[in-house]
Amino acid sequence: MKKLNRRNFIAASAKTGIALGAAGFLSNQLFAAAPPLAPYTSFDQTPLPYAYNALEPVIDAMTMEIHYSKHAAAYAKNVKEAAQAENADTSKPLEDVLAKISKYSVKMRNNAGGHYNHELFWKTFKANGEGKPSGKLLAAIEKDFNSFDTFKTQFSDAGKNRFGSGWAWLVVGDDKKLKTGSTPNQDNPLMDIADVKGFPLLGLDVWEHAYYLHYQNRRPEYIENWWKVVNWDFVQKRFESL
Ligand code: MN
């Protein structure tokens, strides 16, 4: 099958008249990098800051395309539907809804979480990751986990051991300490009902849709390879912005 990158996907879509859904998707912002540190998350899906094939071979172009343009796009669409039905103000940060998600429907919980998690997820990738953080974030990881390798093992285990669908997280707790954990489905650490609470610095999607085309049942291999494309520069800036 012909590999689709962002540019030839757009060209193919235009030829066949496929509607792309997201307003502005074809605008001149298409190749512009998303703001590295948008302080809050909006209800709209932002453009991917790289082509669908940018992360190959770790994450294949088809997985990226389906993940971004189908799965994540659906969360963005559905969270707006839920917001309209439940009178949530979409001009306000999505984080406001997450903080009191227990007051909303299951549809809101699944899609507000799904939208937030993926908006963060795309930004934490780059083609050639640094492999590990540096500066203040590395110092904090070494303080709270003893070593970067210990952190990596704990985080990887959180993803490997999540039964069914969910996410692994690195968060900053209220006590300012870093911790790892995992949440089921599309829950996340900003939710009032979360299993692990805090400000998410880094999240790893371990739903099968994130890896199955390339890795099939080999979730541990997906996780192991994923470390190569972590955008530690972004994660560090996110940490330092707190
Ligand atoms: Mn996903």
Image (cartoon, helix red, strand yellow):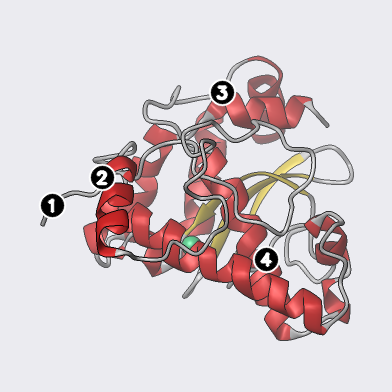
> Which element carries disc 4, helix, strand or loop?
helix
- The answer to the question of whether label 3 and label 4 lie on touching residues, with beta carbons closer than 8 A, is no
Residue 113's label in the rendered image is 4
- Tell me which numbered mark, 2 or 1, is placed earlier along the sequence: 1
- The answer to the question of whether label 2 and label 1 lie on touching residues, with beta carbons closer than 8 A, is yes
How far apart marks 2 and 3 lie (CA) works out to 34 Å
Determine the residue positioned at 79% across, 78% down: 84
Q: Nearer the viewer, mark 3 or mark 4?
A: 4
Three-letter residue code for mark 4: Gly
Q: Is mark 1 within 8 Å of ligand 1?
A: no
Q: Which residue is mark 2?
A: 8
How far apart marks 4 and 2 lie (CA) works out to 31 Å
Q: Is 35 drawn above or below residue 15 in the view shown?
A: above
The number of discs equals 4
Q: Say few, some or many: other residues with alpha carbon within 10 Å of mark 3 (under 14 / 14 to 19 / 20 or more).
A: some
Q: Left of 149 or right of it: where is 16?
A: left
Three-letter residue code for mark 3: Pro
Viewer-closest of 68 and 99: 68
Residue 28's label in the rendered image is none
Q: Which residue is mark 3?
A: 133
Q: Say few, some or many: other residues with alpha carbon within 10 Å of mark 2 (under 14 / 14 to 19 / 20 or more).
A: few
> Which element carries disc 3, helix, strand or loop?
loop
Residue sticking out furthest to the left: 1
Q: Give how far across and how far down residue 83 sits, in percent.
A: 79, 74
Q: Which quarter shows the C terminus?
A: top right
Three-letter residue code for mark 2: Asn
Determine the residue positioned at 53% across, 45% down: 47
> Which element carries disc 2, helix, strand or loop?
helix
Q: Left of 198 or right of it: where is 122?
A: left
Viewer-closest of 198 and 20: 20
